[in-house]
Structure formats: C-alpha cells, structure tokens
Amino acid sequence: MIREHRSREKLEAYYQKYVMTGVIDPNVHPWVADSWKRSRNGNVPREKMDTSHRLTPEAFAERQQKHRDAIHYLAKLSEDVREFFQQYDLSLLLIDQDLVVLKSFSLPYYQMTPGEIEGVRVSEAEVGTSSISLAHEHQSPFWLYGPEMWVEECQTGDACSAPVFVNGNCHYIVTLVSMQQTNMSKDAVITLLLTLRRALEMHLEESAKLHAAESILDAAPFAVYHVMPDSNVAYVNKLGEQRLAAIGAGRKNQLTGVVLNYEHTPIYKGFSGISSFNQEVTWITSRKTYEDITTVVPLYNRDDSDDVNSVVVISMPIEDLRTLVAHAAGYTAKYTLQSMVGHSDIFTAVRTKAARVARNRRNVLLQGESGTGKQRMAHGIHNASAHAAGPLITLRCGDTTPELLDQELFGICRSADVSHPGRLELASGGTLFLDEIEKMPKPIATELAHALETGLMHRIGETVQRPIDVHIIAACDSDLKRLTERGLFSPELYEIISKNVIRIPSLRSRREDIPELAQHIVAELAEQHEMPPKTILPETLEYLRDYDWPGNIKQLQSVLEYAFFNTQSSTITIGDISLMGQVHPDNKWKEDRDIFIQAWQAAGGNVSRLANLLGVSRVTLYRYLKKYGLEKKNN
C-alpha cells in the first residue's frame, strides 16, 4: 500500500499519545494501529532495536548459501544505483520469508554496520512495528513513516518494503530505508523499490524454470551439450558431464583437443547449418572409442541471419539405448524364485541351488523335461542375480531356420544406413535366455561361444567389433552333455554354459506340490482375467495328484485353464477335468493332425493312456500313428 504524504509532527503525537495512554488516535493507519497494539502487548522494547534474535554464524552461512541466487542478483542491481543510494542515504535489505535479514546492501541500516543487522530476525515479535512486518503480514508494498516505527531509535528515517513473489508465493521482502527526512524524493524511492522487486521476481521465476529444466535434463537418460563455434561446451547436463570426464574433458574444454575425429562428426557439420537426427556416430578419443545415437540441432542468431551461433547436441550411448528399449519392450523378468510354488524336498533343494547359483556371475544351464517350468526358473535366477537391473531377453532356438536364428542372435547390417542389433546385443548388461539350446546349429553355437569368450561380437554383414556383457541362462529338454559327446552340440558352447547345471524335476516326481500348484494356477487365472475365484474340491485335487502329467506343469496349466473357463459353478469337480485340456475325445483328431498331436503330447506319447482318453482301441491308434508319422511308445 503506497500512502499519501503525512505530517511527521502529527504522527509523532499519535505515537506518543498511544505509548503514554494506550489510546489509538482515529487518524492512525489501521494496519499500523493493529501492529502497535501487538507490539505493546508483546512487550517489544521501544527505545533500542533488539538484535539478540540472531542466527548462529554456521546457520546464517547455510541460509545465505541457500539463497545465494537472490543475494547475488540483488547485489548486481544495487551496484548500478549506488550513487542514488549515497545521495539519499538509503540502505537496501533483503529479508527471507522467515523475516531474517539475509543481506544489507549499500549504506548501514539504522546506523548499523551490515554485520550487526545481517542474520537478525526482524519480525514484529522482535522489533515491533516496521514496514517489513506490515508488508509481510498484508503481502503488499507498504511505506512507513519514521514516527510510526515502534523502535524509537529507528524513527529518524522512513522505510518502504515490498514482498517478492515467485509463482504466487512470497519468498522475500525487499526494503529501502532512508536516513534523511528532507533530502529524499518519496516517489523516486518507491519507484526504485518496485523496480528492484519486479526485476528480482522475474529473475527468480526464470531461475526456477531454468532449474526445473536442468533437473529434467539431469534426470534424462541421454547427454545434452550446448557447444559454441570454438568447440567449447557452454552447458552440459549430468550424464554429459560424466561422459566428458570419462574422455578427459571438462565443461570448458575445447572438444577439438579431445575428440580426435571432431571435424568428421555431426557437431562440426552443425555449424554449417546441417542438422542430424538419431544418427549413429563414432567418437574417437585417446582413451576409448565410443558409439552413440546423436542428434545435432543448429541454433541461429536472432537477427534472422543464416549464421549459426551454437549447436545443441543430444547423445545416448548405444548400449544405454538398447537397455532402455529392452525395458520399454517388456524385456523384464516377471517372476522371482520366491514366487515359484512348491514345498517338496526335491523342489526346495532346486530352488535353494538356483538362489545360490544366481549370486555368482557364471552362466547357467537348466535341464528338465518339457513343461517343467524352466522359463520361470530363468526369470527367477535373473531377478536374483547381479544382472537384475538389465534386460531379460529370450530366444527360442528351435522356432526358426538357421539363417534367421543367426540374424536374431547377432543382428544384421543390411546397408550403410540400415543395421539392426541382435538379441545378444540387446541383452548386454542383462541376461540372454536361450530356450531349446540343443536345437542351435553347431556353427552358430561355436560363433556364440567365441563372442562370449572374448566379450566381442559383430553383426552379420559388418566387421565392427561391439563389446558385450551378457549373462547366459540356457534351457534344454535333453541331456546336453550326451548330445555334446555324440558330436551333436558345440563343445565350446557347452563348456561355457555348463558351469552351473540345475536339473528341474518333473511334476510326477514332486506330486505333493500338485495341489498347491493347482490352487495357485486357478487363483492366478481369476486375478488375471478379473473373474470370481473358484475352488478346487479336495477329491479333484487328489485326482490331479494321482495323474502322471507327462506334459508337466505346462499340461497342468492347460487342463486347469480349460476347467476354469468352461465350468459354470464356483467349484471345480473331477467331472470338469479333461486331461487333454482343449483336445476333446471327438472325431476331429481323425482328420486334423495338429489336434491328434496335441492329444498325443497330452498322453505323454503313451498309446494305452491315449486310447483310454480317446475311447478307442490300441489297434485304431496304431493306424493313426502311422498315418501321421508319429513314433509309438508302449506302456
């Protein structure tokens, strides 16, 4: 609130009347009157200013450091108007939101040296009525005449205070105090104070935006550089600073002296106005060669000329980008060892071994019949390993041709501009799960063994050697050692992946776990599909427990899925169980080879069991086995 001129003699009379009689004159400003009353009731000293409410030197130094931006900026502004301060005997104060004087600029405040007033709390409770306390209380600029101040030694001059707002909140109070009563232009002082306040507000708002932008850039998974024409780096985010330090450069270093191929990089071309977007770039330094995906954007002068004054560079290490993409694509482990169901002695021993194996960095080979849960075990081992923060990439070796498997594993360079990473690169920093590894052709397996041994690989069609750090978990339905001895599998790769061998037990060898597994599967189905839970009757659990489950947990899962979705009741009975899951004992299998194979697999290749399931004779089955070219297995 900027007030009209008032008679100092009358104001002095109002003050004396109140301190002598306790009666407020009606002409006293209401804000001042209320503050006088609080000052009197709070027994605030009137004769001399109380500076005993002072922060310790350590606490004050910490507070000044916290507010250094505002202090330094106001110091620069006040330096430009020092002559005006001297002409009118003005002092400038910066006070924080707790009403602690952070800094005294220019001439002494209240005839005190800066050291006397700085660090002192000047709220109404400590020094009584002042322009500072009124501006803070009412969140408005306020001019206070000397005779209205509560402390008598401060009544020789006037003061004006204004709150400083940043994003709608009061952060500071700026105050101008005059030691002269006659040699001063009130309007000029008010204008100067409001100008200083607005300049500080704009600076702090821009600083807050800049700080937010820098925080965002520091949290970004890529390096950001602002490079000048002389190759000096004017700005760099946190990751960029780490990259510069790794190559022996600093924030102010010229890149030309560090990046040996600087004139062949997109940065150099950027100063010619050439933009680059997501370009694969090689940076050659005396310490190491780096590969990044880089974007360069030229920044032009504001005079609409074609002159580039600097460039912005956004760069991400290729290995970091692959990890990011792998996570975004869902290449993460879904299961933990603790989530694997079963308390039988045999399974508990396997789970304990898996946890122990996960703690070392050696590769793992999982062996067991099809459907025993090797993939879940791989997830659990990855999650318990030192590579858990990295991706978990899966490659089924039996799902494709040797040529496509080679490309899937190592990647392929199709042209100078098109090159794709393989699963081995994507898994760098994490785990590569090779399922059905026994089906990997020997030449590919031998090449993989060499890559794992050296820690280097190259994509098909190029010679660039790329570093890899991959933890291998392989799964095999057969005895991989015997296959290797028979010359059917690469001995080099077997040597690498067989340092830790875990044999996953069949479901029939851990029958006591079947009821728990069955209940867990049904509960999981209800949760995944947001359906009401269903209960498996005890006699049904016993029926499931007594079955041999040639397809192991995978078959159990299929059977229970069929029962869950095809049972109207909230309970699953023995009659709801079809041991062939989706395969029904109708005549479709007689015409459809795929349906017959599903039934054949569900029966574990056992003719007698399949005959009973389909309700036909063994002789009939033999005819269809021959028709479909399947090997028969008797009891």
Image: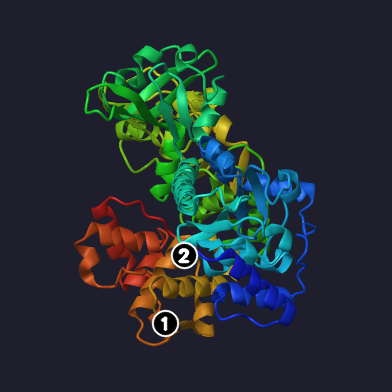
Label of residue 440 in the image: none
| x, y percent for residue 150 | 69, 67
Which residue ends up furthest to the front in the rendered image?
A: 9
- As measured in the structure, the alpha-carbon distance from the residue carrying label 1 to the one carrying label 2 is 76 Å
Which residue occupies 66% across, 46% down?
64
Label of residue 532 in the image: 1
Q: Nearer the viewer, residue 2 or 95?
A: 2
* Residue ID for mark 2: 4
| CA neighbours of label 2 inside 10 A, class few (<14), some (14 to 19), many (20+) | few
| x, y percent for residue 386 | 61, 43
Which residue occupies 50% across, 41% down?
218
The secondary structure type at the circle numbered 1 is loop
Judge whether residue 547 can be spotted in this image. Answer: yes
On screen, residue 592 versus residue 102, left or right, reads: left
Q: Earlier in the sequence, mark 1 or mark 2?
A: 2
On screen, residue 468 versus residue 561, left or right, reads: right
Which residue ends up furthest to the bottom in the rendered image?
A: 569
The secondary structure type at the circle numbered 2 is loop
**Circles 1 and 2 in contact, beta carbons < 8 Å:** no
On screen, residue 343 versus residue 53, left or right, reads: left
| x, y percent for residue 144 | 57, 63
**Above/below status of 310 relative to 548:** above
Q: Amino acid at mark 2?
A: Glu
Which residue ends up furthest to the left in the rendered image?
A: 591
Which residue occupies 40% across, 83% down?
575
Determine which quarter of the picture holds residue 128: bottom right
| x, y percent for residue 432 | 48, 40
Q: Amino acid at mark 1?
A: Pro
